[in-house]
Amino acid sequence: MREAASAPAPTRATIGDSEFDRDTAVTRRAPGVYDIDLSAGWTIISAVNGGYLLAVLGRALADALPHNDPFTISAHYLTASQPGPAVIRTDTVRTGRTLSTGQASLFQYDEEGGEVERIRVLASYGDLDTLPDDVRTTAKPPSFPPMDQCFGPEDGPTPVSGSSAIADRLMLKLDPSTLGWALGAPSGKGEMRSWFGLADGRDADPLSLLLAVDALPPTAFEIGLKGWVPTVELTVHVRARPAPGPLRVSITTRNLAGGFLEEDAEVWDSEDRLVAQSRQLARARLS
């Protein structure tokens, strides 16, 4: 009697050949001008996720500048982006031997065909592989349960309020101690922690780190707020090229005042290295 053949292992996407790469790919129309069709697969309700948008602009700047890796990128979100055609215009501010600086804006079109600026960024790029290995830090990796003891959107009995297309493209496994909001009992601590990856298995790289810092549920949920928390400004520092394997993301909010809150994020790789940090200012819905 022949034994049944075992099912083949699922194919993992690779850097450069994944849904994330295809959906952030830009087409150079002219020097410094790029076209893209923003994918509906990275939306939160109907708006395009801010981290995905930052990765799109980051990819355009990587092409426009002489250096490939984002070291620091600051974005101001001016109007909500929608799936569909967009144009990116970049401008080189300065180039040097170790760093180059550029700015970029993403535009879409109103009903009359006029351009509307959605997001504007200023960024400095370099080569992460040339950085020295000397690390002196008091930062420690976040401590939370192993992945099989954490929970993702697929573990809930019903879709989480505000869930969206982007959840299908991510591997999120959240620390149970930051999931009180999903059970109607938020902790009030303003913390969110999760294992993070792309659903197709693609490993992280510097551009996907720009997505990772803005991909978790808002810390506002654990403060007891509900609804969309739109980003006003987001700054990301990429500190190292991440090692293969899942990331750990820790986000905290210490101050909600005047209808605005900050989110401070740390991203750690599988080798316990702090590979990205960010801070964003977001608007909170108080009623």
Image (cartoon, rainbow, N blue to C red):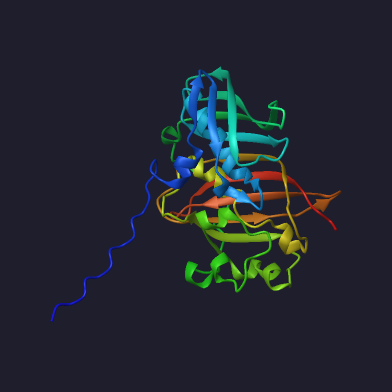
When the figure is inspected, residue 259 is found, relative to residue 37, above or below; the finding is below
Note whether residue 286 is visible: yes
The answer to whether 226 is drawn above or below residue 156 in the figure is above
Residue 105 at x, y percent in the picture: 63, 28
Q: Quick check: 114 left or right of 172?
A: right
The residue closer to the viewer here, 193 or 56, is 56
Residue 247 visible in rendering? no
| x and y, in percent, of residue 285 in the image | 81, 54
Of 266 and 85, the residue lying toward us: 85
x and y, in percent, of residue 269 in the image: 47, 52
Q: Quadrant of residue 226?
A: bottom right
Q: Residue drawn 61% across and 25% down?
A: 103
Q: Nearer the viewer, residue 85 or 284?
A: 85
Give the residue at the far bottom of this rendering: 1
Q: Which residue appears at 39% of the width and 40% of the height?
A: 16
Look at 67% across and 69% down and name the residue there. Answer: 182
Horizontal side of 200 relative to 94 (left or right) equals left
The image shows residue 101, relative to residue 201, as above or below, that is above
Please tell me which residue is depicted at 76% across the width and 62% down the height of the picture: 223
The residue sitting at the front extreme is 112
The percent position of residue 41, horizontal first and vertical second, equals: 55, 49
